[in-house]
Image: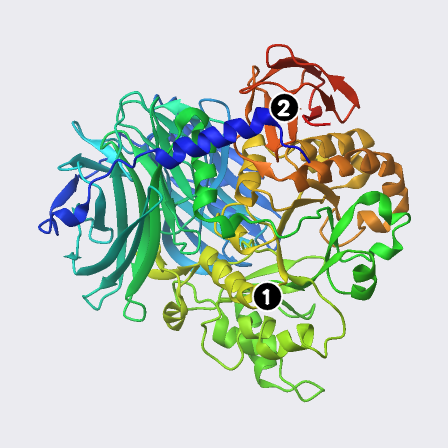
Amino acid sequence: MSACPSICLISMCALCLTCVAEVRSADPAADQNLDGQVAKRVLAAPASGENLLRGEAWRPWQAGFVRDAETFVCDNGGERQAQRGAGQTVILNQARPEPIVATAWSKAEKVTGTPDSDYALYLDLVFQDGTPLWGQAAPFATGSHDWQRRQVVVFPERPVRSLTFYLLLRNHGGKVWFRDPVLHVMSTPQAAFRFDGVPVLVQDASQAGFQVRDVAAASDFVRIQRHALDLQLDWKRSEHGGTTFIDAELRDTSGRDRAVTLLYAVPASAAASHWLHDLRSSEPVQGEREYVNATQFRAGGGRLSRYPLAAVADDRRGTAIAIDPAYPAFFRAAYNAGSEELFLAYDIGLAPEKPTARVRLCHYSFDPAWGFRAALARYYDLFPDAFRCRTPQQGLWMPFAKISRVEGWEDFGFKFKEGNDETAWDDAHDILTFRYTEPMTWWMTMPPEMPRTIEAAVAEARRRADEPRADGQRDRHAQALLASGYHNAEGQFPARLLDTPWCNGAVWSMNSMPGIAGDVTDFKNKWNDKLRDQLYGPDRKSNLDGEYIDSSEGYVTDELDFRRDHLAAADTPLTYAPETYQPAVFRGLIAFEYARGIARDVHAMDKLMMANSTPIRLCWLAPLLEVLGTETDWNPGGRWRPMSDADLLYRRALCKGKPFCFLMNTEFERFSPELVERYMQRSLAYGMFPGFFSHNASQGQYFTRPELYNRDRPLFKKYVPLCRRVAEAGWEPITGARSNDDKVYVERFGDRYLTVFNDSSQSRTVAIRLDAPAPTASRELVTATAVTWTAGATTLTLAAEDVAVLDLTP
């Protein structure tokens, strides 16, 4: 296959420029007298004036509330599906992003179920650009309790137009009272600005290096070379190909529980610089603003970076800072215009059981012409094994159902099978088969007559762990709960009481790290030497291709595990609770250690790893995996709401050339052939695979219903071969081509293909211009028409949500 000069030349130029770019930094080892020196003085942050909530502005949410003076009463009684609450919308019209703090108190009487966002202080935000941020919540405890205070802190990335403040009791029986709701915007004292969410005065930001802050003690940010704030830092610096790598271990020397932020900062001038938010968007650096692309968790400082890197650039040079994907921690990568620093901040918990935390990071320069895409391309070069594609042949993901029973199955492009119910047939037909596991949960069914309470669930789990079954064996899942079960902040086993198609009972939060002590643990139940030999050894019954991890980011598992003996079991750094500062294990790092523990064995056997539900908010699982995907619903309630460009590109970027597969979980009776085609067109634009599953992830599976898949067969035959063609060519971040319409996107696959996608509700005519000389001939593959180029450009007309595939070397 001949290479396309219009793309390859650009790639070579960008690579050469990246290789010779300089990293602007100072060597902190040059000064040995920095320990304990204040880099940024932290100031008190008063609220901005009075409470923004107004007593007369409260409105009922759903069935509403009863007002008793200044108290709101929601009484669902025995109605577990009842919906009650109070809400108030506040217009903020922020000119710049400012932190928002919401608090409220509640007491409860016989509230059923387990803590979740249905009995909570709950915020919905709308930014000035019209995009939303839903569901920022702080749950209250269930059962019966006296007054509890809850707080939600939001660090908005963009200015907020409005906010709706809710006090909710829904999907729980019982009665609750709410009082003292407060909403304010955190003001910044005069002459100060916000750094990592707190107001500071800069003392010294001229040098690259480490800083540390004792969050629990509300200390300043101080420099640390070796010792500061009862902490010891051992670190080393190395240079490889123009990139600076930092390996560091932080150790507590006080013997106490600690909650700290460890920071590594690189000076980067704000003058004429742009913050590179992601592959599609950037903005000029302004004022003293802080820039970060993060998602929200109730852990550490509350913000976890979506991408493993952050970058800024001016006209001459780009600068990036990044984590090593093999050494994750609860972190954010950001740029602060006030201090003119590009930095990584790690929210680290330390405890007597685990007094150390190890991190590894790097910073580097890149050619600014392609912005974030160039920074990402360089990151791929630095960590090639994390992004190498080991599945040259790609295709659709089939969950559970037997492919052999699909009429004319060859038309649908199946390649990856979740489940090992017909492995021999799959092997004979070139289908890769993966055995199913699900970490961080135990779904425990409960008898219908058993009360749906945590107390009853705990008693049932202990009974199963202690009492032999009819076969003489005790329930190993229940035994694993005793060793691997989370503890919440009160030292209790947390669970969610759910009624799903696959389980009516309790779903327990489990710590699936390999290091958990005990003869029977959640990890050992799901992966051990005996099981490995049984599945993959010489006496195996079938030829599996690898292991599949379901719900890999943990959608029904608590975010933090406070169990003290689990702290010592963690290999990755601990974090801490945002209000109490208790050290804890973060769910996302349990997911990492579980996947890594299995992947080490699987990869050693030259087998593969596949996972569902990633990448969504965690950037560190994709490097461990070969096949990735997610279940999704782009037509909830019959309303077309496809995944956004930002979310699709995020997944594409973290997978690079690895296959990413969708399973559409929707009501297929309302998912018309027109919507099926729009789904396939959007998937094709990003080199992803448009699969199908079930409306409730269990029943009525699409590929068990011939009336559905035969209806859509022509669309599969049209689009899936094209999806495979571009995906197998391998997505590349630097496109070598540009669109003159910001709603028409161009992506590159290998040296040969460009996809062009109209992400709008209107037909658009767009010019696509190559950065290098155009090919002498090319074709558009969806319509099978010739494409002509004039002065390095061509013009296409695309209908709403339509896609074109340009073959530059037909």
Question: Which secondary structure, mark 2?
Answer: loop
Query: For the residues carrying marks 2 and 1, which lies nearer the camera in this image?
Result: 1
Query: What is the number of the mark on residue 602?
Result: 1
Residue 561 visible: yes
Question: Farthest left residue?
Answer: 33
Residue at 52% x, 64% y: name it: 594
Q: Residue at x 67, y 76 (%)?
A: 537
Residue under circle 2? Answer: 759
Amino acid identity at mark 2: Asp
On screen, residue 350 above or below 315: below
> In the image, is residue 3 above or below residue 237?
above
All told, the count of numbered labels is 2
Image spot of residue 258 (x, y percent): 26, 60
Pick whichever, 356 or 95, lies toward us: 356
Q: Position of residue 509 (x, y in %)?
A: 52, 64
Q: Which mark is residue 74?
A: none
Which secondary structure, mark 1? helix
Residue at 56% in and 45% down: 655
Work out which residue is located at the far front of the displayed protein and give it. Answer: 2
Residue found 50% across the figure and 44% down from its top: 168
How much space separates mark 2 and mark 1, taking CA atoms? 39 Å
- Residue 507 x, y percent position in the rendering: 59, 63
- Indicate the amino acid at tag 1: Val
Quadrant where the C terminus is found in the figure? top right
Q: Is residue 300 left or right of residue 65?
A: left
Q: Quadrant of residue 718?
A: top right
Q: Nearer the viewer, residue 143 or 662?
A: 662
Instruction: Say whether residue 43 is left or right of residue 344.
Output: left
